[in-house]
Image (spheres, rainbow, N blue to C red):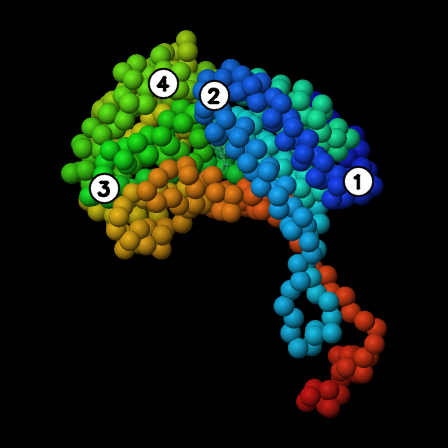
Amino acid sequence: MANYTELVSGLCQVFRSGKTKKFDWRFQQLTKMLKMLEENKDKFCEALKKDLNKSKMEACLTEVDFCRNDLVYCMNNLNEWVKTEKVKKNFINLMDTCYIKREPFGVVLIIGAWNYPIQLTLLPMIGAIAAGNCVVLKPSEMAIATAELLEGLLPKYLDNECIKCVNGGIPETTALLAEKWDYIFYTGNSAVGKIVMQAAAKHLTPVTLELGGKSPVFVDDNCDLSIVANRILWGKCTNAGQTCIAPDYVMCKKETQDSLAEAMKKTLREFYSDNPAKSPDFGRIINDRQFQRLKKIMDHLGGGKVAVGGETDETQRFIAPTILTDVKFSDPIMQEEIFGPILPIITVQNEDEAINFILNHEKPLTMYIFSQNSTLIEKFLESTSSGSVCVNDTLMQGSVPTLPFGGVGNSGTGAYHGKFSFDTFCHKRAVMERGLRMESVNSIRYPPCTETKLNR
Ligand code: NAD
């Protein structure tokens, strides 16, 4: 079994030297990361094509340019973020200086997932470096081409003494997790999230867990269903449904279901023509295991009917964008996160039935509400909980760097993107600086206890 004790102790020593804490070092590394993204854009797109058949537009929009934008935002603001933060004081502290000093944790481990193999590794790394940490990055072994590319490029651009990339699968990740880290940032499924948290607990290491779950969509009556269909299907079909914040299932009234399914049929034809298998814009399932898992869902539909799609091709790991109608909450597809291009529609009596279903299950990573009724929107916001919410669109909430990206409960703990990434990788150290004068004021808190002191 691999052993990373030396790797980690080496990084601890470098961290102690103070090299990574210097602002210039952080800024220089971020500049080099930007250069890496710009000079290798085509290579990144090619790797994503190989791993997931991502189109160039999708690869740029959701991975390469996505990271670039976050990186530029970070570089433009880092000067401000690193400043100490003065805090309000009360009367007895008026003469003191009180502030929060953001300091790096030390040596941090970042474990990425395969579905956005560039974004899910580089985005947290931006925060970790900006905060002044040493980093070990473990890309997902499932996205092979991207993992190899990262392993080759990172040492060419970044300071290899402080930033390491380790490739490998479960044995390597298990060995990494056995080490003592100052912070662990994990992205992936909730079951492995528990393994990561248990390993971290042995050393009381703080964690961020970016996990998944079934993210619901509620479609209210009286919405323009052609717009709703476009926006839901864009979110569902991006990366062939392998997106953590993809809409997992739709709930609407019986009267809305048939018109929505019809509108969705039209949208799919517009997006991918009548033959999505031939469309250059539609992705593939990452590997055979995931393909078989999705195929099994399609083979055991329960009450659901295929309104559109349903075709599969094992040789290409292709699953057609598929809309299912009349699905029941008890059907097999509703028992786990779908994580593929299959969209069940479930009819409900009213919004209360939808809210009750959400409340009776794990807190989702995100929630989508399509409605023009502010009272109904407020009702969902007030009575449910999820990592994020987006009203009248999908995925777009993840593109706002001033909004935290993360889950709650079973869908995760902690958040990142923009300044939230920087803050994630900083310990907020409370500092109080006092002078040595005015000792008479302090004498009231020293023993011995006297009546006079008590009655002041
Ligand atoms: P994955 O298989 O790539 O696993 C993620 C990481 O965990 C990999 O680096 C892998 O090596 C490691 N790993 C896997 N099994 C392990 C084990 N037994 N012990 C230690 N490490 C192990 O990705 P996945 O879990 O299939 O990812 C899909 C899930 O991740 C979905 O549930 C999705 O919703 C979620 N996800 C969440 C986010 C988010 O930001 N919240 C983003 C992407 C994916």
| Residue located beneath label 4 in the image | 319
Spatial CA span between label 2 and label 3: 32 Å
| Residue located beneath label 2 in the image | 56
Q: Which of marks 2 and 4 is nearer the N terminus?
A: 2
| Residue located beneath label 1 in the image | 19
Q: Which of marks 3 and 4 is nearer the N terminus?
A: 3
- Asked whether disc 3 touches disc 1, contact meaning CB atoms under 8 Å apart, the reply is no
Q: Earlier in the sequence, mark 2 or mark 3?
A: 2
Q: Which of marks 1 and 4 is nearer the N terminus?
A: 1
Of marks 2 and 3, the one in the foreground: 2
Residue 241: name its quadrant: top left
Image-based side of 376 in relation to 34, left or right? left
Residue 130, percent from left and from top: 67, 41
Q: How crowded is mark 4: few (under 14 residues within 10 Å), some or many (20 or more)?
A: many
The amino acid sitting under disc 2 is Lys
Of marks 2 and 1, the one in the foreground: 2
Along the line of sight, the residue nearer the viewer: 449 or 115: 115
| Residue located beneath label 3 in the image | 223
